[in-house]
Amino acid sequence: QVQLVESGGGLVQAGGSLTLSCAASGSILNINGMGWYRQAPGKQREYVATITSDGSTTYADSVKGRFTISRDNAKNTVYLQMNSLKPEDTGVYSCNVDLIRRYSRRNEIVWGQGTQVTVSA
């Protein structure tokens, strides 16, 4: 089994900061890309940021310059540092991990359960 455990969500005022983390554990041989997505109430899930195994990053235009994605490969953990938060950043943030299972050697995309981020005006 593979599990993703997310933490770090919460309530913050506009202009504030939060850091999300997502730790992968279980039967993992290797992790390729890791990323974050979010879903606002009444809207579809949208892409936020991704980081490759060699540390290359990409961001949605809406978060560029405010959010930073990083990873700790020794801990199988991805982070999302969110600064200058806006009310429109409110939503459920979910991590996404592209991994290779240890025994089956199968490639699989695994999602976290999501963590709520609420930004008040």
Image (spheres, helix red, strand yellow):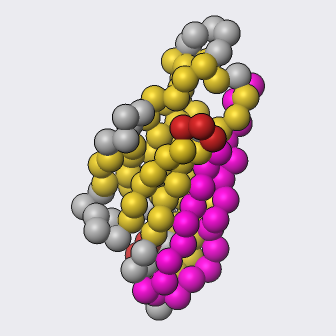
Q: Quadrant of the N terminus?
A: top right
What is the tally of numbered marks visible in this picture? 0
Was residue 13 drawn as part of the magenta stretch in this picture? yes
The span shown in magenta is: 1-23
Q: In this rendering, is residue 15 above or below 29? A: below
Q: Given the current orientation, which residue lies at the most extreme top position?
A: 104
In the picture, measured across the screen, residue 57 lies left or right of residue 82, that is left
Q: Is residue 104 above or below residue 43?
A: above
Of residues 78 and 63, the one drawn nearer to the viewer in this rendering: 78
**Quadrant location of residue 53?**
top left
How far across and down, in percent of the image, does residue 103 sit? 67, 9
Work out whether residue 120 can be spotted.
Answer: no
Location of residue 62 with respect to 25 vertically, above or below: below
**Residue at image x 60%, y 55%?**
21
The vertical placement of 114 against 91, above or below, is above
Image point 38% across, 52% down: which residue? 49
Q: Nearer the viewer, residue 87 or 83?
A: 83
Q: Is residue 42 left or right of residue 5?
A: left
Main SS class of the magenta portion in the image: strand
Hey, which residue is sitting farthest front in the picture? 74
Residue 56 % position (x, y): 32, 42
Residue 79 within the segment the image draws in magenta: no
Q: Residue furthest left?
A: 61
Q: Is residue 107 visible?
A: yes
Provide residue 83's location: percent of width, then percent of height: 42, 75
Q: Position of residue 110 (x, y in %)?
A: 58, 33
Q: Residue at 28% of width from left, 68% of height from top?
A: 65
Give me the residue at 37% from left, 41% from top. 55
